[in-house]
Image (cartoon, rainbow, N blue to C red):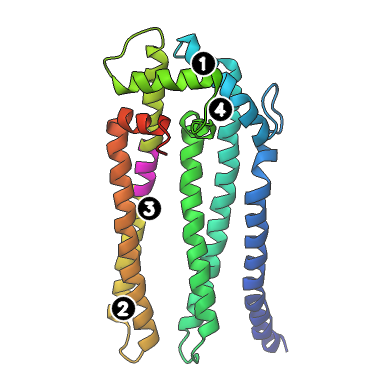
Amino acid sequence: MRTEHVPSRRAEVSGRAPAVLVALAVVLGAAFVLAPGRLAGIGTRGGPSSRGGLVDGLSPAFVSYWESGDRRVPADLQRLVDYWSRFHVVKGVLSAALLIVLVALAVRLWKAFLRPGRRAGGGVAVAAVSVSVLALVSLAALMANVQGAMAPFSSVTSLLPLGEPHGRLADAIGQIQQGLAHHPGQGGRNAPVLEAMVDDFGWYHAVLAVLASVVAVVLTVLSVLAWRRFATADRSEVRTRRTMRWFGVLSVLLALMVAVVALANAGTAADPAPALLGFYRGGM
């Protein structure tokens, strides 16, 4: 009796697993959208408790930093930068968890689709492709949030109203543009602040260059594994061979695209001033 019930229990557990993974993905996706702003504000003293509070306080704090002429970030702006770093840490953790769940679900779906003897399963294939695309989106979100967490100053400045600055912010942006246009030959009282901004912007792009390089290597390895599986599969396994061929092609194409991103960001990291000028001119 015991041996008769074991297979059915295993089948039941196996059948429940995709549903559990889908439920986890939904919960994590909702948390990714709704939770970071609230969680990042927990336990802060004198800092913002939400993204709205961050945006409201960013412009005057940024202008005060620029006008100070001191390379060190003042306390009021540092609190905003720290909040933004925590915001990205929370989103990074959630996107990493979501990526793990989606990869696990995609692997199960592709295995089900490629199971020997299984009849054509268009619905399973569509689900597997959809989950795989969502996993790639989660990977991109993870990279962006790791970048934001590791270089929060440059990241938070993207929230400045650079398209339509007013008052002291407009004056500061104009001075920054002028300083960057003559970098590194600019002088004046604001030179230390400008240099700190250029250095941080270089670090911001260096982080993404490293992340993209790692992802490109992983995708290349996956492409090699897919082609190896294609080569070793029996010719009668038409579905497996066709799927592995597509995996191999798409993986290497994605690896090339990500490698281009890595190279572009490495170039910006080596000479960040021109790109930072473009940013303050509204080019990003």
Give the CA separation, mark 4 to mark 3.
Answer: 27 Å
Give the CA separation, mark 4 to mark 1.
Answer: 12 Å
Three-letter amino acid code at disc 1? Tyr
Q: Is residue 221 magenta?
A: no
Instruction: State the extent of the magenta-drawn residues as a range.
Output: 206-212
Kindly state the secondary structure of the residue where label 1 is placed: helix
Q: Which residue is mark 3?
A: 215
Q: Viewer-nearest of labels 1 and 2? A: 1
Q: Is residue 130 above or below residue 161?
A: below
Three-letter amino acid code at disc 4? Val
Answer with mark 3 or mark 2, whichever residue precedes in sequence: 3
**Label 1 Cα crowd, 10 Å radius (few <14 / some 14-19 / many 20+):** many
Q: Which residue is mark 2?
A: 230
x, y (%) of residue 160? Answer: 53, 30
Q: In front: 96, or 161?
A: 161
Give the CA separation, mark 3 to mark 1.
Answer: 36 Å
Q: In percent of the image, x 62 and y 61: which residue is there?
A: 25
x, y (%) of residue 34? Answer: 68, 48
Q: Viewer-nearest of labels 3 and 1? A: 1
Q: Which residue is mark 4?
A: 81
Q: In front: 189, or 84?
A: 189
Three-letter amino acid code at disc 2? Phe
Q: Is there CB contact under 8 Å for labels 1 and 2?
A: no
